[in-house]
Image (tube, rainbow, N blue to C red):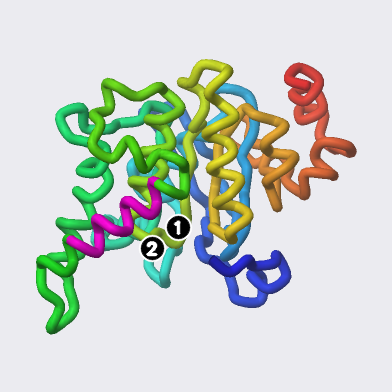
């Protein structure tokens, strides 16, 4: 995968453009007029206190939460528009959750190939047989498992795996759809401390390979190392954003200074 510099990605224009995004749950305004652009190849890491709107923002990007108002432009269409073909766009947005959400009654390999088998056979090119698609998906899944060091677990069931292994499988499952962007919602928060590193290493490798990603995390060391841009969210707004070096060494807003003092 080609690595993309921030300058190059800016010249191509944003992959996702968020404008005046508002999300309310009843009378509770969780996101208050959020605007930001995410460029190809960017690694955007979202930090901030619990309850600040981070996960809701991420879930709005692929409309797991329906925005109250505003727009989310992806591939020239507004993801916030109820009429948009949301499933078609979600295929290009890989999502990794806090909980692994693997199907317990399916093997690791079947967990990974289920969605590609359904989607790619339905929309296959002329002259390509269903058998060829299924074989291709299987080989791709095994290749991805090798990439995360879990090829030997292809025929295992999720109940036999550690938390770190389950989360690595969840990442592979998202990658099997060949997404344009990966969304990570606190991917290590459900893991025992000794398993956090193995999952972060996989995400770091994806970042090194040039994958566009938006990651909500409480892992400040990861944010420093991987992010091309750190976004600090608090009380439903983007309070401050910038390079990791500036955010962590020269924060400007009092709220960010207070947050970093409490977590570092």
Q: Is residue 33 visible?
A: no
Q: In the rendered structure, which disc, 1 or 2, sits on the residue that comes first in sequence?
A: 1
Query: Which residue is depicted at the point 45% across and 63% down?
Result: 73
Dot 2 crowding, Cα within 10 Å, few <14, some 14–19, many 20+ = some
Number of other residues with Cα within 10 Å of mark 1, as a class: few under 14, some 14 to 19, many 20 or more: many
- Looking at the image, which is closer to me, 14 or 240? 14
Q: Residue furthest right?
A: 250
Residue 181 seen in the current view: yes
Read off the residue under disc 2: 78
**Gap between marks 1 and 2 measured at Cα:** 5 Å
Please identify the quadrant where the C terminus is shown.
top right
Q: Quadrant of residue 84?
A: bottom left
Position of residue 244 measured from the top left corner of the image (x, y, whole percent): 77, 44
- Indicate which disc residue 218 carries: none
Q: What percent of the width, then of the height, locates residue 236? A: 57, 34
Occupied quadrant, residue 193? top right
**Residue at x-position 43% and y-position 37%:** 168
Circles 1, 2 touching at the beta carbon (< 8 Å): yes
Q: Quadrant of residue 90?
A: bottom left
Percent position of residue 24, x then y? 42, 35
Q: Is residue 173 one of those drawn in magenta?
A: no
Residue at position x 65%, y 41% in the image: 238
Q: Is residue 67 left or right of residue 6?
A: left
Local secondary structure at mark 2: strand
Q: Residue at x 70, y 31 (%)?
A: 220
Tell me, yes or no, whether the highlighted magenta stretch contains residue 141: yes
Which secondary structure lies at badge 1?
Answer: strand
Q: Main secondary structure of the magenta part?
A: helix
Q: Position of residue 37 (x, y in %)?
A: 59, 59
The residue carrying mark 1 is 72
- Look at the image and give the residue range highlighted in magenta: 135-145
Residue farthest toward the front in the current orientation of the protein? 152
């Amino acid at each position: 995968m080609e690595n993309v510099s921030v300058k190059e990605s800016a010249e191509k224009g944003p992959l996702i453009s968020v404008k005046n995004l508002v999300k309310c749950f009843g009378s509770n305004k969780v996101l208050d007029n959020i605007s930001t652009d995410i460029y190809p190849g960017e690694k955007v890491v979202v930090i901030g206190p619990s309850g600040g709107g981070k996960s809701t923002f991420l879930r709005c990007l692929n409309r797991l939460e329906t925005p109250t108002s505003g727009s989310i432009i992806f591939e020239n269409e507004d993801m916030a528009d109820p009429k948009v073909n949301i499933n078609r766009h979600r295929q290009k947005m890989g999502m990794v959750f806090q909980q692994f959400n693997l199907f317990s009654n399916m093997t690791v390999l079947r967990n990974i190939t289920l969605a590609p088998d359904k989607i790619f056979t339905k929309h296959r090119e002329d002259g390509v047989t269903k058998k060829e698609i299924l074989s291709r998906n299987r080989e791709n899944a095994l290749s991805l498992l090798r990439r995360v060091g879990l090829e030997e677990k292809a025929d295992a069931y999720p109940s036999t795996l550690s938390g770190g292994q389950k989360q690595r499988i969840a990442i592979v499952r998202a990658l099997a759809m060949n997404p344009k962007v990966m969304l990570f919602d606190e991917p290590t928060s459900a893991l025992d401390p000794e398993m956090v590193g193995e999952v972060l290493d996989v995400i770091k490798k994806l970042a090194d390979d040039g994958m566009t990603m938006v990651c909500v995390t409480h892992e400040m060391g990861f944010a420093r190392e991987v992010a091309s841009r750190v976004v600090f969210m608090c009380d439903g707004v983007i309070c401050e954003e910038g390079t990791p070096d500036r955010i962590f060494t020269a924060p400007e807003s009092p709220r960010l200074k207070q947050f970093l003092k409490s977590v570092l």
